[in-house]
Image (tube, helix red, strand yellow):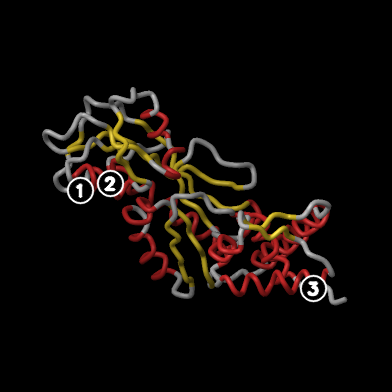
Amino acid sequence: MHSPNWDTMRYVLAVIEAGSVSAAARALGVNHATVLRKIATFEEQYGAALFDKGANGYRILPGKEKLVEALSEVENGVLAVQRLMEGANPLLRGVVRIASTDTICQYLLPSVLGKLQTASPELEIELLSNNSHLDFARMEADLFVRPALSLPDDVIGEVATHLVFRAYGIMDCPDKWLSLKGPLRKSAAAKWLGEKSSEELSTTGSDSFLVLAQMALSGLGIAVLPSFVGEEVTGLAQLPDRMPDISVPIWVGSHRDLRDIPRIRAVRKSVIAHLHLQGDHWGVEMPG
């Protein structure tokens, strides 16, 4: 029996975690047939079925829990090797993937990329716009730029500036607060809105502050927005009497194993410096 390689095993883990072939395919960026083929290959090499393949998705069969633990250990080992090998490269060249929210990607980060490319033309910067948090242990991104009150233990970061939430709307807009949907429900703004009564909150909302700004501009209600978004949308006015400023740190950081890689360290320092300088321009509070 041939030993399954890591490429096959990572497909198996993706299906275990996603619960379905379709969801695993989306996470891996491949088609449905590729995942099915990899699962079939693994089960053939392993010599037995691994999944209960039902209408509700793929579930690991009873008694296979130890195998799942072993697969996870292999994954951790492979990723550790990748991070160590990345750290052995002393040149400011190669790809640096920066993950952030759609608002920060659109309003705060693009201008820094030109400066980085001019200073280090062999660097290739990828800007990943996603309001959900990525898995840095799995190398989905090298750096993150995120508003958060604190960071998880497996990453390191520095506060570059502060994001400030404020209320925005148009003249004579409905006296209703637009709702925050999806990942935005975990934001500090959502926590503040959660203290409102149901009569004050609209069921209309979005999972993007960029979309919420346009909804407010269309007269659908009052939007809680980052100040650097609300101040740039022509037609929206700040409503200072409706809510206090809510300040949240914007962190720039990476996985602990990546912190000393030269190109990642250089990009991290540049982004931190850029955001610090941009604070006054956007009406963003500066740290300490």
The amino acid type, in three-letter code, at marker 3 is: Glu
Q: Which of marks 1 and 3 is in front?
A: 3
Q: Nearer the viewer, mark 3 or mark 2?
A: 3
Task: Indicate which disc, 3 or 2, sits on the residue closer to the N terminus.
Answer: 3
> Answer yes or no: do the residues labelled 1 and 2 have beta carbons within 8 Å?
yes
- Residue holding disc 3: 44
The amino acid type, in three-letter code, at marker 1 is: Val
Measuring from the top left, give residue 157's x and y in whole percent.
Answer: 54, 46
Could you tell me which secondary element the residue under label 2 belongs to? helix
For label 1, the crowd category at 10 Å Cα-Cα, with few meaning under 14, some 14 to 19 and many 20 or more, is some
Residue at far right of view: 1
- Residue holding disc 1: 233
Q: Is residue 260 among what the camera can see?
A: no
In the displayed structure image, the side of residue 61 where residue 120 appears, left or right: left
CA gap, disc 3 to disc 2?
53 Å
Q: Which of 283 and 46 is in front in this view?
A: 46
**Residue shown at 54%/61% (left/top)?**
264
For label 3, the crowd category at 10 Å Cα-Cα, with few meaning under 14, some 14 to 19 and many 20 or more, is some
- Residue holding disc 2: 229
Q: Nearer the viewer, residue 164 or 202?
A: 202
The amino acid type, in three-letter code, at marker 2 is: Val
CA gap, disc 1 to disc 3?
57 Å
